[in-house]
């Protein structure tokens, strides 16, 4: 059950890292974890987990959200 709840977060973090919004060091640190790292790498490749996840859309939406927040903070 915990894998079902954790997988969406891992997929989102990896997408945001790949999109340049989070540091790559986070992904590298996750991948070094002895049990969690290999599982995380495998879960982001499983179509049954990612079929509904639109990485480009998620990254683009987050970039817009960050830009909006930056503009509001001026």
Image: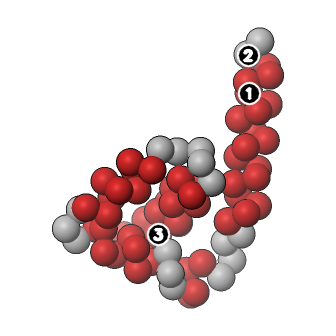
Q: Are marks 1 and 2 in contact (CB under 8 Å)?
A: yes
Q: Position of residue 74 (x, y in %)?
A: 77, 12
In what element is the residue under mark 3? helix
CA separation in Å, label 1 and label 3: 27 Å
In what element is the residue under mark 1? helix
Label tally? 3
CA separation in Å, label 3 and label 2: 33 Å
Q: Position of residue 26 (x, y in %)?
A: 39, 49
Residue extending furthest toward the top? 74
Q: Dot 1 corresponds to which residue?
A: 69
In what element is the residue under mark 2? loop
- Work out whether mark 3 precedes mark 2 in sequence or the reverse, and give the earlier one: 3
Of badges 3 and 2, nearer the viewer stands 2
Q: Residues within 10 Å of mark 2 (few under 14, many from 20)?
A: few
Question: What label sits on residue 73 in the rendered view?
Answer: 2
Above or below, 61 relative to 53: above
Residue extending furthest toward the left? 34
Q: Residues within 10 Å of mark 3 (few under 14, many from 20)?
A: some
Q: Residue at x 51, y 60 (%)?
A: 14
Q: Residue at x 74, y 27 (%)?
A: 69
Question: What label sits on residue 7 in the rendered view?
Answer: 3
Q: Residues within 10 Å of mark 1 (few under 14, many from 20)?
A: few
Q: Residue at x 53, y 66 (%)?
A: 11
Q: Position of residue 64 (x, y in %)?
A: 79, 41
């Amino acid at each position: 059950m915990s894998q079902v709840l954790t997988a969406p977060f891992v997929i989102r973090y990896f997408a945001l890292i790949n999109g340049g919004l989070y540091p790559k060091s986070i992904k590298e640190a996750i991948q070094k974890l002895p049990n969690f790292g290999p599982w995380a790498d495998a879960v982001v490749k499983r179509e049954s987990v990612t079929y509904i996840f639109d990485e480009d859309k998620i990254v683009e939406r987050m970039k817009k959200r960050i830009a909006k927040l930056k503009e509001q903070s001026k």
